[in-house]
Amino acid sequence: MNDESNPQKGETSPLDAPDFSSLMNNQTAIVSGGVNRIKRMTEEHPVADETSVGDIHSVALVVRGISESVRFTEERTEVVLGRSDLRSPTRPDLDLNYLGAAERGVSRRHARLELKDGHLYITDLNSSNGTFLRGTRLNPYTPTLLRSGDEVLLARLAVSITFE
């Protein structure tokens, strides 16, 4: 018997999107239309890659509801995050002082955001109080891949990083 047929009317029903939400990881589903149907479904509804930056102008940092755009260009693919200090000639590309960076232990040159091959990475620049991603302290000078919506702690300053 064809799983697309209506046995009472002898008609073929339209193909509805199957619901796989009730399946466990090791269960099998029978999909009407077989392999070709699954192929069509995946082509029509591509899975979004949370790590790909589609628009380099969409990268933003969000701190306590305040959004700060990060300015990347084809030539400028790195941005240093930190805080300015009048006693130091060193300035970060993006000064987070107005967001409470000094009070929360952010270093002058705390971390670097780098856009490489369409993906966004964060690198701790050997900051005094560390950079944390998903509860883990990052090793200094080791680029770590970010996903859109990741929350990063620059010392004790929580920053959500979003991009499209």
Image: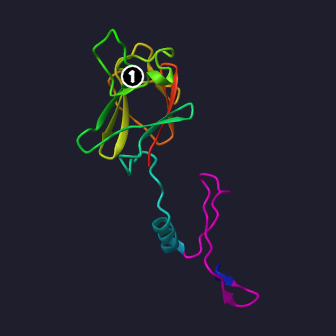
With respect to residue 16, does 76 lie above or below? above
Expressed as whole percent of the image width and height from the top left, the position of residue 8 reads: 76, 88
> Would you say residue 23 sits in the magenta stretch?
yes
19 or 115, nearer to the observer? 115
Magenta highlight on residue 22: yes
Q: Residue at x 44, y 49 (%)?
A: 164
**Nearer the observer, 91 or 17:** 91
Span of residues in magenta: 6-33
Q: Residue at the right extreme?
A: 8
Drawn side of residue 10 relative to residue 75, left or right: right
Residue 142 sits in which quadrant? top left
Could you say where residue 90 lies in the image, as x and y percent from the top left? Answer: 29, 17
- The crowding category of the residue bearing disc 1, from other C-alpha atoms within 10 Å (few below 14, some 14 to 19, many at least 20), is many
Q: Amino acid at mark 1?
A: Gly
Residue nearest the viewer, comparing 39 with 151 = 151
What number of labels is visible?
A: 1
What residue is drawn where x is 65% and y is 57%? Answer: 21
Magenta span: predominant SS is loop
Q: Secondary structure at mark 1?
A: strand
Please say if 28 is above or below 145: below
| Residue corresponding to mark 1 | 82
Residue nearer the viewer, 62 or 16:
62
User: Where does residue 94 sit, x and y in percent of width and height?
Assistant: 37, 28
Compared with 82, 4 (above or below) is: below
Q: Residue at x 46, y 41 (%)?
A: 147
Most extreme residue toward the top, as rendered? 87
Image quadrant for the N terminus? bottom right
Q: x, y (%) of residue 100?
A: 50, 20
